[in-house]
Image (cartoon, rainbow, N blue to C red):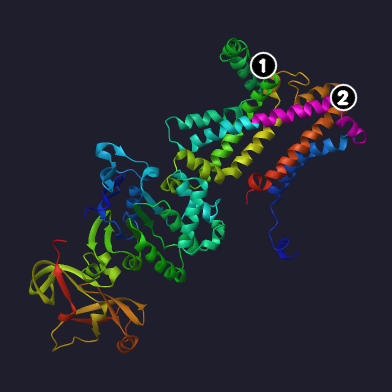
Amino acid sequence: MTRNGTIGGRRRPPIVLLAPAVLALTFLVLPLAGLLVRAPWSSLSQRLTEPAVLTALRLSLQTATIATIVCVLLGVPLAWLLARVDFPGRRVVRALVTVPLVLPPVVGGVALLLVFGRKGLVGSWLYETFGVSLPFTTTGVVVAEAFVAMPFLVIAVEGALRGADTRYEEAAATLGAGRWTAFRRVTLPLVAPGIAAGALLCWARALGEFGATITFAGNFPGRTQTMPLAVYLALEVDLQDAIVLSLILLTVSVAILASLRDRWINTP
Amino acid sequence: MTPLLDAHLVVEHGDAFRLDIELSIAAGEVVALLGPNGAGKTTALRGLAGLVPLHAGHISIDGRVLDAPDRRLWTPTERRPIGVVFQDYLLFPHLTALDNVAFGPRSHGVPRTAARATAAAWLARVGLADLARRKPRHLSGGQAQRVALARALAVDPAVLLLDEPLAALDARTRLDTRAELQRHLTEHPGATLLVTHDPIDALVLADRLVIVEHGRVVQEGDAATITARPRTDYVARLVGLNLYRGKAHDHTVTIGDGFTLAVADVLDGDVFVAFAPTAVALHPHRPDGSPRNTWPAEITGIQRHGDNLRVQLTGPIVAAADITPAAAAYLHLAPGQRVWAAVKATETRAYPAAGA
């Protein structure tokens, strides 16, 4: 301690900022701590291996992964279009892409039903032509998750593309590379960390998806009942089970956060 | 002989800037585009490469028209027979030196193995065979410059474009790299355009200089002509001469409002007069009895210049004078001080301002 109330040579932060900051931190951490405190540790391993839990977990991991792959395959080109091609209405398109971010997921689910439902705009055609019906199927879960999670990927990749130096693409062009070759051999490797970060965020969002999934795909164990849905259901039956399922989701989220820490969450 | 590159480049940036220059370069010739920052040199290079669109004019290489906005003709960058060395090289950071050089041949459809063999040969030619597997971040500035040169040459470009190829290097590396670059440019069978703001690079590397100011060619010619007979203040400063424009009659040149200089050459009409700063002598009082140009001047600045001091003068004409430190000490020179400047007529060079 030195003079004038300094700590370690630095000035003490003002209490007006410090108090709410500590309060915010407590508010964010306390529920997670509560989950850990109330967890039925003694029966944990037995509850974890219950077939219903494993089924929901497997379904969640599968659908979130497939949804992420779909988002990467479609979302990266969309992000490239937004970042590199100057077309009329680009601002409107960019705004539209972010709509699922602010839309309540339940509303998203209703919208998906109206379009992909058996009597929906696209759904009726799908059903009559191919006999395919999306609502209340595992594919429906993937559709709902991709709809909600895609903006995370597009925004992250578009940001990475805007941050990447376009002069590397010019250099590629002077060496005879067309736009596709330049994209594949130069742009893509340069923004790979951004795509990885976007895909992780996208996957985490898909994994936690609840509202659109339950609205569009329903809650059928083994078919459309993902972990968040299982948590919600368990809450009405057995609180202990709900806590265990929540712990699994929490563990996965924290693992993702940790792997993203250096690239995305922490800014220097 | 028809030039390999024949171009008339017109590029506009709003109302503020307009580039309008004509360039033609023969096979095997190295031309330096020299000019101050913002003169439009890099814009000209990007126009040739197809990285900025032309508003008018044309580009043809080897008789083939690549770009002619009036005829709605345009060839995208990747289909122009060019190679570019960028100012900061722009080596692809995720590829090794070898794969950077192989990128061009690969993009032109050469199979991977053959492209790598070509790249290895080019790296050997620039003396970097050992560093083929290094990533660009593990290369020094001079090494990166050589990889960039090898990468540009590996596609056998008809026209090689270099944008300030030595600007990013420190003084020591620059000297070695410049000598090496000269060797490769001499060996390049195609046309070479070198963009630079450094007169030394231009004088050492180029067969011919094209000097650009404010988007226009102000002077063009070989190094000897340009250093002997500068035609703008920028060129005069580059080659270290005092330069004035005036009206000549017999042995007298009138500059501005009636200030006259006696010159050795006999001319009539619009002329340039040039003399070196070392030709200017400074005196505390008006010198008399000698057949010299003399005028009263005020010192505005003094800087080191090699072993001498360069004294900036105002007065009827603005001039620079180089004097020895001993002379400076004897004269007690300081900014603001009034002196007399003198130049012998035989030390001046006068030449017509009209024509090329």
**B283 sits to left or right of A189:** left
Q: Residues within 10 Å of mark 2 (few under 14, many from 20)?
A: few
Pointer 2 and pointer 1 on the same chain:
yes
The region drawn magenta spans A41-67
Does residue B295 show up magenta in the picture? no
Amino acid type, mark 1? Pro
Q: Secondary structure at mark 1?
A: loop
Amino acid type, mark 2? Asp
Coordinates of residue B137 in the picture (x, y in percent): 56, 58
**Relative to the observer, which residue lies in front, A29 or B88?**
B88
Coordinates of residue B125 in the picture (x, y in percent): 45, 62
**B188 sits to left or right of A189:** left
Which quadrant does the N terminus of chain B fall into? bottom left
**Residue at the extreme right of the image, as rendered:** A42
Image label count: 2
Q: Chain of mark 2?
A: A
Marks 2 and 1, Cα distance to the nearest angstrom? 28 Å
Coordinates of residue A183 in the picture (x, y in percent): 50, 41
Q: Which residue is mark 2?
A: A238
**A15 sits to left or right of B36:** right
Q: Residue at x 73, y 31 (%)?
A: A61
Q: Residue at x 62, y 38 (%)?
A: A198
Q: Main secondary structure of the magenta part?
A: helix
Circles 2 and 1, Cβ within 8 Å, touching? The answer is no
Q: Which residue is mark 1?
A: A135
Which quadrant does the C terminus of chain B fall into? bottom left
Q: Residues within 10 Å of mark 1 (few under 14, many from 20)?
A: many
